[in-house]
Amino acid sequence: MGQNILYGIISVAICVGYFLMVDHFLMDMQGLDFWYMFRK
Amino acid sequence: MGLVTRKKVFSIMALCAMVGLLLFPVVVSLPSLAIGADAPDAAKKEDAKVEKGRDVYYKTEGIVVGAPAPKTVDGPKDYPRYNFESRVLLWFANQQHLYYGSFVLAVPIFCMVVEFMGVVTKDKALAKRYDQLAYDFIKISLTAYSLTAVLGGILIFTFLTLYPAFFGYLSSIFRPVMHIYALMFVAESGTLYIYYYGWDKMKEGFLKWIHLSMSVILNIIGTLLMFLANSWIGFMMSPAGVDEQGRFLGNIWHVLHTALWNPLNLHRILGNMAFGGGVVAAYAAYKFLASKTDEDRAHYDWMGYIAMALGVAFLIPLPFAGYWLMREVYAYRQQMGITLMGGLLAWLFIIQATMIGILFLSTNYYLWQAMGRMRGAEKYQRYIKYLVFILACGYLVFITPHTMVMTPAELKAMGGQQHPVLGNYGVMSAKNGGINVIITTTVLSFVWYMRGNKVSTVSWSKFGNIFMGCFFFFAYVNIIGLAIYGYYIPANVRVGLSVPQVATTLSCLFFMFALNSVMMKGAKQMGPIEWGKISARSQYALIMLATAFTWMMGLMGYIRSSVRLFWHVNEIMRDNSPWAYTHTVGFAANMISFNVLFFWISILFVFWLGSLAAKKVPAGEKAGVPGSAPQPAGSH
């Protein structure tokens, strides 16, 4: 059970990090700011 | 010289002949490609009189070497007619030629892929089955090929008879490459026949590789043919290489390489492949339903699955190619984009969304049904209802229109043209989210199907499964999150969100397929795939898939053509015929349905002709036909 939780935490960290990177860099490549709403 | 050596020499000679056929049209036209056929004459006259023009798209200057676009008038000279709407006749001829053209260009590509799979696979029995399947594919396409040529002839006669001024102008612009097209067509025919009739002679070893190389040449020729044909429609929508009067400026590359040429090329090649897969799958479904023996059912079930899988592999990236095309349309002329997606033709896009949704729903339904023929896939059955829910939500958002057609009373009751709740789903932000959710769910269904009867034996399988679950979950979160985020930021930033949304979906497609393949390497099998033991409903789903493809192709062709409104060649040559108006949605839908019906009736005739040839095969040779049930797992 503990091992599953560890696997879950690692997976969540990788997935969240990956998708945030996808969002940030692909918007940046278009000259757009992904964090527009939060910076305003 | 031994028999084998002689065969090798002849095979290599045949391959060289094909390469020669491919290169010949290009070589003979090199001078015209460089400067245009009329340019040398024009250069000679340069001293006498040089008139220069400015390219409407590239903005470069060039020597005028062509006549201006004719200013047509409504009359028998420019628009001769029968007692019928000429545009409808042309529409019919064009659409039928396109259907068959797409089919005969797509099927050899399938054939190449399946033959390659047969050559590289180590399992001899499976290799033989792939080879037979590839042969079945090309056999179907061969009969259709003759009909495509006949329809091409009919199309040219329709143009010449009903729109001579327009056709004359277009021919004059494309004159430097017209003969390439004709020679390519000859090369395609020659290559196809050598490829088909050489099948039995080049079955094994080195000769098989030569045969496979021939399919590559065949497909290169077919693709080039399609690119040339696409350049005409690209020119009609977004002309280049001519000045504002429509005079050719001597650079044929500019005429070919218009703003929309490459997006059209990509969109059409993917669309053709998806369409071809759909038609072959429908053929297999029909044969499955008509089969009398388990062996035949197993074979056609397998054939239907392979054709569907290949078709869907190209269907998944198709919306993204469509998105690129639309983006380029907007970049070329914003008004054109607005006419398409926000104005006159917007309702047709709602119908298109409905059809796209049906395609994906049918695909998913087929995959869920197909899990029924695998022992061990029952574990996924209880989760399918959740996939249905997700798909239904995505689909409903995807098809919701921005505004509704209403009576004044309804308008008043609702408080405006937009519904207070549903109106929110009528914008691109929501629709991008909807379609990406649908595609991601289809990828998930595929992953489940691929691991249906298997249990991973890799040491890290637990982590792999948890990671895969997380990846899909966060992919959904990201897609839906970006769709919602789009409502809170300005339009110029919002438009960029579609790129990470698409990347998220594609990440699921590539990474999860790759991860699944690694996890399932050497996996324990719960039982074989029992080909042929699938519900009849699944086969109707395949027929539905093919019909929806056909209908959608007709619809999208109409939309693309209609966006020129009253222009033969956008902003260059005006359409002055009495039919230079946009039809009602109802009329267009009826016309598309008629074209679809005609295509399916005629292709049934083609299939029937093909079955006549099959019946002549001696009984002893039928032993080579693959598909005896059950087949070993792992063949998907």
Image: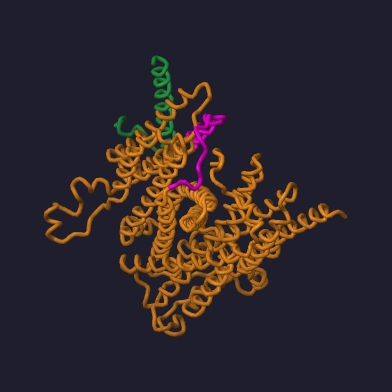
Q: Nearer the viewer, residue B188 or B584?
A: B188
The residue at the point 31 percent across, 62 percent down is B344
- Residue furthest toward the bottom? B76
Q: Is residue B163 visible?
A: yes
Q: Is B415 left or right of A13, judged from the image as shown?
A: left
- Residue furthest toward the right? B1
Q: Nearer the viewer, residue B429 or B150?
A: B150
The residue at the point 41 percent across, 67 percent down is B597
- The relative height of residue B153 versus residue B352 in the rendered view (above or below) is below
Q: Is B439 left or right of B126, judged from the image as shown?
A: left
Q: Is B392 left or right of B540, judged from the image as shown?
A: left
Magenta region: which residues? B510-534
Q: Nearer the viewer, residue B178 or B318?
A: B318
Q: How many marks?
A: 0
The residue at the point 39 percent across, 51 percent down is B537
Quadrant for residue B371, please give it.
top left
Return the x and y of residue B151 as percentages of the image width and height: 53, 71
Return the x and y of residue B165 as percentages of the image width and height: 49, 78
Q: Is B429 left or right of B635, judged from the image as shown?
A: left
Q: Is residue B409 magenta?
A: no
Quadrant for residue B468, please give it.
top left
Q: Which chain is orange?
A: B
Q: Which chain is green?
A: A
Return the x and y of residue A32 as percentages of the image width and height: 39, 38
* Image quadrant containing the N terminus of chain B: bottom right
